[in-house]
Image: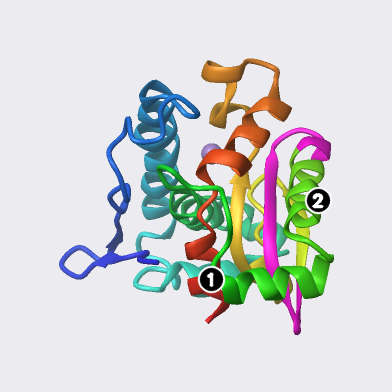
Amino acid sequence: MSNKINEKTSEHILPPLPYADNALDPVISARTISFHYGKHHKAYVDNLNKLIAGTEFSNQSLEKIIAQTAGKADKTAIFNNAAQTWNHTFYWSSLKPKGGGEPPAELKKKLEASFGAVDVCKKELATAATSQFGSGWAWLVLDGAKLKVVKTSNADVPLAQGMKPLLNIDVWEHAYYLDYQNRRIDYVGAVLDKLINWDFAMENLG
Ligand code: MN
């Protein structure tokens, strides 16, 4: 995954989407992507660049900024914008056109060892996504040797708790409201069945 810094300006860059803005249609419309990527994600990057200009955090990777600002009350704005920049780049890669279906064999084995079955993992992801009160994220993570499903609120990212993210699902209303209104459960179900990118999770497993 690339979270790049422009070497000339030392500013964080909004990475290009890994597919066309209408490639996830009809599960996620081009209109949703245009706001979600073009406005929300871009705003996190722009705000981060403004907040860190001329500070100890300029020229640092997102991961470093996240690690150094997590849980610090006087660095909340920097943490939120750095984490949301990271979370969104990760989210775009957690989805793909014609995703869903069977995970690659090695990941499938690991999912079965941790959850009993792939479907149990999908159910846990759906439950985490729909039970997150307010804005946040559902995640598949590697925690020690075990795969786990966790949820985080607002900008929070499991990296900050020492877990390795494998994929995520954005459950902020801006991720689904234009297409699904209040039906978060339908958005999450469609993402898990039709878009989730198990290959990306496999790559992150390393
Ligand atoms: Mn979002």
**Residue drawn where x is 79% and y is 75% of the image:** 113
**Residue drawn where x is 39% and y is 37% of the image:** 37
Q: Which residue is mark 1?
A: 202
Q: How many marks?
A: 2
Image location (x, y in percent) of residue 182? 70, 17
In-image side of 33 versus 156 (left or right): left
**Residue drawn where x is 78% and y is 36% of the image:** 130
Q: Which residues are magenta?
A: 130-147
Task: Measure the C-alpha gap from mark 1 to mark 2.
Answer: 18 Å
Identify the image quadrant of the N terminus. bottom left
Q: Is residue 132 magenta?
A: yes
Looking at mark 1, is its residue's CB closer than 8 Å to ligand 1?
A: no
Is any part of residue 68 visible from this angle?
no
The secondary structure type at the circle numbered 2 is: helix
Q: Which mark is residue 124?
A: 2
Image location (x, y in percent) of residue 16? 28, 50
**Which of these two is toward me, 65 or 21?**
21
**N-terminal-most mark, 1 or 2:** 2
